[in-house]
Amino acid sequence: MALVRRLAQLPSSSGPGRAQFLVGQFRALVQAHAADGWTVPEYARELGVRVERLSRACRAIAGRSPMRMVHDRRMAEAKRSLMYTAMSVQEVAFSLGFDDPAYFTRFFVRWEGRSPIQFRRSARRGDGEPNS
């Protein structure tokens, strides 16, 4: 609710400053709730804006849709966990809020082009993407 109050205090214009602020707050929420499986409408509701407004701001400032930003964050966290922990793929899936490890694997393959196991093996050999 503090976010809603802060957003309400901003000028009602939809200029770049407001969009930057909104996207910054969105990124903070994504960081805090990436493992909670929030939908874009849930993020928008928490921010006190319509989904369309959030989408326009994200595309203008970040060049990506809000959903893409959420997926990118979850993928970064998945890669980090696969590279730097001994958690199983199932444990990584659950830690990121996926109810089904098979769905997590399909999600990972769709975004990464290889399975979590293949990514981990590649990362351990040194030909992974440690900066992702």
Image (cartoon, rainbow, N blue to C red):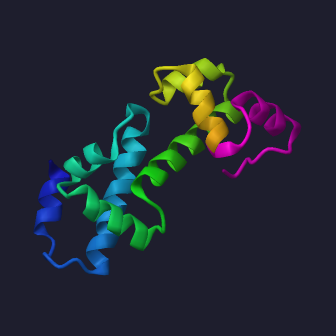
Q: In this view, does 116 lie above or below 58?
A: above
Residue 66 figure quarter: bottom left
Say if the magenta span includes residue 128: yes
The one nearer the camera, 102 or 3, is: 102
Q: In this view, does 93 lie above or below 63?
A: above
Q: In this view, does 60 lie above or below 42?
A: below
| Left or right of 42 on screen, residue 104 | right
Residue 20 figure quarter: bottom left
The one nearer the camera, 127 or 98, is: 98
Point out the stretch of residues depicted in magenta: 111-132
Q: Which residue is drawn at 58% across and 35% down?
A: 107
| Left or right of 72 on screen, residue 14 | left
| Residue furthest right as drawn | 125
The one nearer the camera, 54 or 29, is: 54
Q: Can residue 79 be seen in this view?
A: no
Q: Is residue 10 above or below residue 119?
A: below
Q: Position of residue 21 (x, y in %)?
A: 30, 68
Say if the magenta span includes residue 14: no
Q: Residue at x 82, y 31 (%)?
A: 121
Q: Residue at x 73, y 47 (%)?
A: 130
Q: Is residue 3 visible?
A: yes
Q: Position of residue 31 (x, y in %)?
A: 42, 46
Q: Residue at x 48, y 53 (%)?
A: 68
| Left or right of 43 on screen, residue 125 | right
| Left or right of 11 on screen, residue 57 | right
Q: Position of residue 123 (x, y in %)?
A: 79, 38
